[in-house]
Image: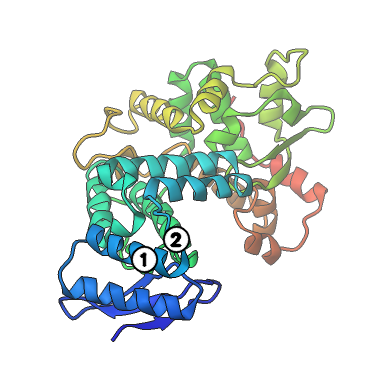
Amino acid sequence: MASLRKVPGCTNWIACFTDKDGVRRQRSTGSKDRRVAQKIADSYEEASRKKRTSRQARTVIADLHRSITGESIRAVTFREFAESWLNTKRPETAPSTAKFYENAIAKFTAAIGAKADSEIVDIAKGDILAFRNSEAKLFAPKTVNHDLKVIRMIFRAARAESVVGEDPAEFVKTVKSSREGVRRSFTLPELRAVLSVADDEWKSMILFGLYSGQRLGDIATLTWANIDLPAGELRLVTRKTGKQIIQSLSGPLLEHIEALSCPDDLTAPVHPRAYDFVVKQGKSGNLSNQFADLLAQAGLREKQAHRKTHGEGRGVGSAKTGISFHCLRHTAVSLLKEAGIPAAVVMELIGHDSKAMSEHYTHVGSESLRKAAESFPSLL
């Protein structure tokens, strides 16, 4: 016999019933009334045992719900629920994160086709597995797992709101690959080789990446308002974590900045082409590809076609060679540590990724940070 249960934080009863194969199922009844919910739960079980299709079963239950309560059950499609979830998330996250969520949802809706406009309860674990496996043929494991995480978040929210009784994504595992490599630091000869083939804007971005340790997207979107030359400081809020960074400029970076032409409009970007790419696309993927081309020109990795081929996602090249633009951040940390700078000062200068890391280290004085910045070797 079908039974009912409550999920913490949900007002509607969840039906627990046995299907035709003897498997115990759970699904929201859409009702707060226990008497109504029990009848709906019994109908779920009856419909399942009579081998009715999902659509036939929902029609029976909808008619039953309408006859008892006088109200209609509104069917929610995956596309509708995902859009509602995304609208909720936008004010809570950075624009780049919201854009990432949007892209992951677009990939999934394209993968499931017509099911995106069917009821969300029609989507099964097999659909999500098929999406994961198809992505694994096109993208690096990290990208696949990030997209899968977004889909999990959506179904977790759907279950919490009693839109679905079961979470089909709950037990879909992430992908693993032996291709995933460990990022390493650049050597100084390698950096000089890359600088020798870079144009002026890319040379500037590489120097900013090395001497500030900041990420590609943050460097690409720097404006002259982020640079306080009289104070010798770089000030920005990171796109990934929203952390405010106030960083002492190293001698080599300060020398480089002073050689640039500073416009009267401080809102102007320091690196105009890169800035336009990130603003228009909402991400720095195109710039990552350009940097990969520079690495190839410098003889540090093989030339890679920037298109999706079977099993060759954009991250595959960096996984094989262990170097990417992000490695400039690792290089900055390595150079500071080699210069004898304490770990607390290194982490404060570069900027922690997490609140826990920030709390782990005590406050570092500005004089210590300035001395650390001055320990960088010059590549100019």
In the picture shown, does residue 165 fall above or below 283?
A: below
Pick whichever of labels 1 and 2 is earlier in the sequence.
2
Amino acid at pointer 1: Asp
**Amino acid type shown at disc 2:** Ala
Tell me which residue sits at (40%, 51%) in the image.
146
Do the residues bearing badges 1 and 2 touch, measured as CB atoms within 8 Å? yes
Tag shown at residue 371: none
Q: Which residue matches tag 1?
A: 167
Query: 101 and 369: which one is in front?
Result: 101
Q: Secondary structure at mark 1?
A: loop
Q: Quadrant of residue 377?
A: top right
Helix or strand or loop: what does disc 2 sit on? helix
Q: Could one spot residue 365 in this view of the protein?
A: yes
Can you say whether 337 is above or below 163 in the image? above
Residue at image coords 45%, 28%: 287
Residue holding disc 2: 158
- Where's residue 248, x and y in %? 74, 39
Q: Quadrant of the N terminus?
A: bottom left
Q: Position of residue 189 (x, y in %)?
A: 45, 33
Please report the residue visible at 63 percent of the width from the left and 38 percent of the height from the top. Answer: 212
Residue 340 point in image, percent of width and height:
64, 53
Foreground of the two, 142 or 332: 142
Q: Nearer the viewer, residue 243 or 113?
A: 113
At which x and y percent is residue 260? 68, 16
**Circle 2: is it few (<14), some (14-19), or many (20+) Cα within 10 Å?**
many
- Distance, label 1 to label 2, CA atoms, is 8 Å
